[in-house]
Image: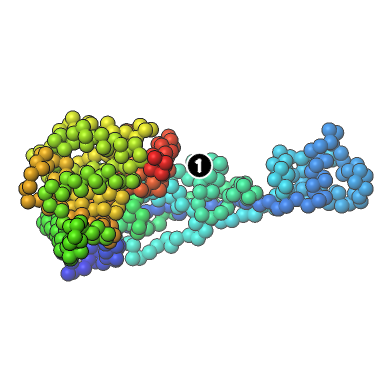
């Protein structure tokens, strides 16, 4: 089943999916990808639907008579009032009675359902039935509805290993049976079938399970992905492009507790893990070095554009090399000019740089709507840092707030990187050998060099690399916040996404987690972004 030439256990049917994942970032490497089968329930259901149509003029007179007359009229009395043949009145009343709009009495009375339809200017049509199929998957929390059934037997699936042999995904089909009519209506309404749309007068009146649910085989994929940015393995259970969160979390816990081995699950040995880890890290570092070398070459090319009269560097879309004293000057100038976003990565952070003057500048920037992200760390594990950031420095940075009380500076350990970079407004990129937040206050020449880059594609490349690391951190922080119900942690995640101009991601995560209490935070984020246009 696996490609004979592949060192990694990748199912040949999943190779395109693996290529797509690895193309997202050079830091990602899929170490294993294997298909499994699992059982789900397929239950046929008959739903009875009633739709509305516009009320005609005679029907309107009859319904209004049933509503407005204090003493109910008979068909003959209403015919006399309207000056019409009672045959027409009686025939229309019979139609309305069959639709349960008019009561089955000799006097004209309107049913509660009839009043509801009449208020919308409509009457129901005769009900009809539709057969649909409900699918309850042990890998997903929701019930899926389709018009057509799935094949009960697929010989190709029988050859796949059963996921239930590794993780508990077997369950009884009790959820569907226990649902009330209203619950079924809401569940079907959430599907894409368009069978229950009350606002359009299309209503499900009844649901009937035709026969017990049948077990059928479906396939899923388990992937083991190494992320060099975080130096860790991630397990994913997927249906094509969709990650199945619940069973993924379950499987990750079993592996972490050593109740399942990656070797038995995906034929993934320690040798393969170690080899691919080192190869991915090497590739990542090589690409970083290649990016810096490219910037260096651009700087050399643009060196000829120096104005010989004033010795002033021409900075329109250039890569310029700065040395020694020029570096600190450029550092302050670039930060002060920020309009919306500052991203800093410095292996170390010290109180020598993060002094009162620097803190005052950051607060002024935040007050005018600028978001600031700071990542730090050079060791692969935070506890292994030989020069950890002083807690009092971290506390001072975290104390910088927006006028609405949100964290204006988000600083956190990312680790495993010696890069020293600043990106401002996705327009200016500073990179080189200078330790931005820990240069010990030494302003004498030390032979350091920094490149100030304003070439759009170069800045974009650097921004995508750094922002990806910050996005990963925000996602992990959010997942932990939802799991532990930690409001402070959740707010930090939202502010990181806002700093990266990913408000749509933040809003979607709030909806997915049903944390509507966080919506006021998003309003405060909007106010922060408006400040950059008003100050």
Front residue of this view, candidates 103 and 82: 82
In the image: residue 526, left or right of residue 256 = right
| Quarter holding residue 119 | top right
Task: Tell me where residue 93 appears, x and y as whole percent.
Answer: 81, 47
Q: Is residue 368 visible?
A: yes
- The residue that disc 1 covers is 179
**Residue at image location 45% in from the left, 43% down from the top:** 175
> Does 366 appear above or below 215?
above
> Does 12 appear above or below 222?
below
In the image: residue 107, left or right of residue 43 = right
> Does 15 appear above or below 348?
below
**Residue at image location 11% in from the left, 49% down from the top:** 324
| Quarter holding residue 270 | bottom left
Front residue of this view, candidates 467 and 263: 467
- The quarter in which the C terminus is drawn is top left
Task: Tell me where residue 451 appears, x and y as whole percent.
Answer: 17, 55
Q: Is residue 18 visible?
A: no
In the image: residue 336, left or right of residue 62 = left
**Residue at image location 65% in from the left, 54% down from the top:** 128
Residue projecting furthest to the bottom: 5
């Amino acid at each position: 089943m696996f490609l004979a030439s592949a060192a990694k256990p990748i199912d040949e049917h999943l190779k395109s999916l693996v290529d797509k994942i690895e193309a997202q970032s050079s830091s990602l490497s899929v170490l294993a990808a294997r298909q499994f089968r699992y059982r789900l329930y397929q239950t046929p259901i008959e739903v009875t639907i009633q739709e509305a149509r516009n009320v005609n003029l005679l029907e309107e007179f009859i319904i209004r008579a049933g509503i407005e007359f204090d003493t109910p009229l008979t068909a003959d009395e209403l015919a006399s009032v309207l000056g019409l043949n009672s045959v027409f009145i009686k025939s229309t009343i019979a139609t309305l009675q069959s639709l349960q709009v008019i009561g089955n009495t000799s006097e004209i009375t309107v049913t509660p359902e009839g009043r509801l339809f009449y208020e919308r200017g409509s009457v129901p049509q005769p009900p009809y039935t539709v057969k649909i199929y409900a699918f309850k998957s042990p890998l997903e929390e929701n019930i899926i509805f389709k018009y057509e059934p799935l094949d009960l037997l697929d010989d190709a699936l029988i050859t796949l290993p059963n996921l239930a042999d590794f993780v508990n995904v077997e369950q009884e089909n009790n959820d569907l049976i226990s649902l009330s009519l209203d619950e079924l209506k809401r569940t079907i309404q959430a599907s894409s079938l368009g069978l229950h749309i009350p606002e359009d007068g299309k209503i499900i009146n009844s649901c009937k399970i035709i026969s017990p649910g049948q077990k059928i085989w479906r396939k899923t994929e388990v992937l083991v992905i190494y992320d060099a940015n975080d130096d860790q393995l991630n397990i994913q259970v997927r249906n094509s492009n969709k990650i199945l969160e619940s069973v993924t979390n379950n499987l990750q816990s079993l592996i972490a507790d050593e109740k399942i081995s990656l070797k038995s699950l995906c034929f993934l040995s320690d040798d393969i893990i170690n080899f691919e880890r080192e190869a991915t890290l090497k590739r990542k570092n090589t690409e970083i070095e290649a990016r810096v070398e490219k910037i260096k070459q651009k700087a050399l090319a643009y060196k000829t554009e120096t104005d010989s009269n004033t010795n002033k560097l021409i900075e329109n879309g250039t890569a310029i090399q700065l040395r020694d004293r020029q570096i600190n000057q450029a550092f302050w100038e670039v930060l002060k000019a920020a309009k919306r976003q500052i991203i800093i990565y410095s292996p170390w952070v010290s109180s020598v740089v993060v002094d009162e003057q620097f803190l005052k500048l950051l607060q002024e920037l935040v007050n005018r709507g600028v978001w600031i992200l700071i990542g730090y760390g050079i060791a692969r594990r935070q506890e292994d840092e030989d020069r950890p950031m002083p807690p009092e420095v971290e506390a001072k940075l975290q104390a910088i707030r927006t006028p609405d009380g949100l964290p204006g500076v988000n600083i956190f350990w990312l680790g495993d990187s010696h890069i020293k970079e600043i990106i401002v407004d996705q327009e200016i990129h500073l990179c080189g050998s200078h330790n931005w937040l820990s240069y010990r206050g030494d302003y004498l020449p030390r032979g350091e060099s920094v490149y100030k880059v304003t070439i759009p594609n170069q800045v974009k490349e650097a921004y995508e690399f750094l922002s990806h690391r910050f996005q990963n951190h925000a996602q992990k922080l959010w997942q932990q916040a939802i799991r532990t119900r930690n409001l402070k942690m959740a707010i930090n995640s939202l502010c990181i996404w806002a700093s990266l101009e990913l408000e749509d991601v933040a809003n979607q995560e709030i909806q997915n987690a049903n944390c509507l209490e966080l919506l006021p935070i998003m309003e405060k984020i909007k106010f922060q972004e408006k400040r950059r246009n008003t100050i």
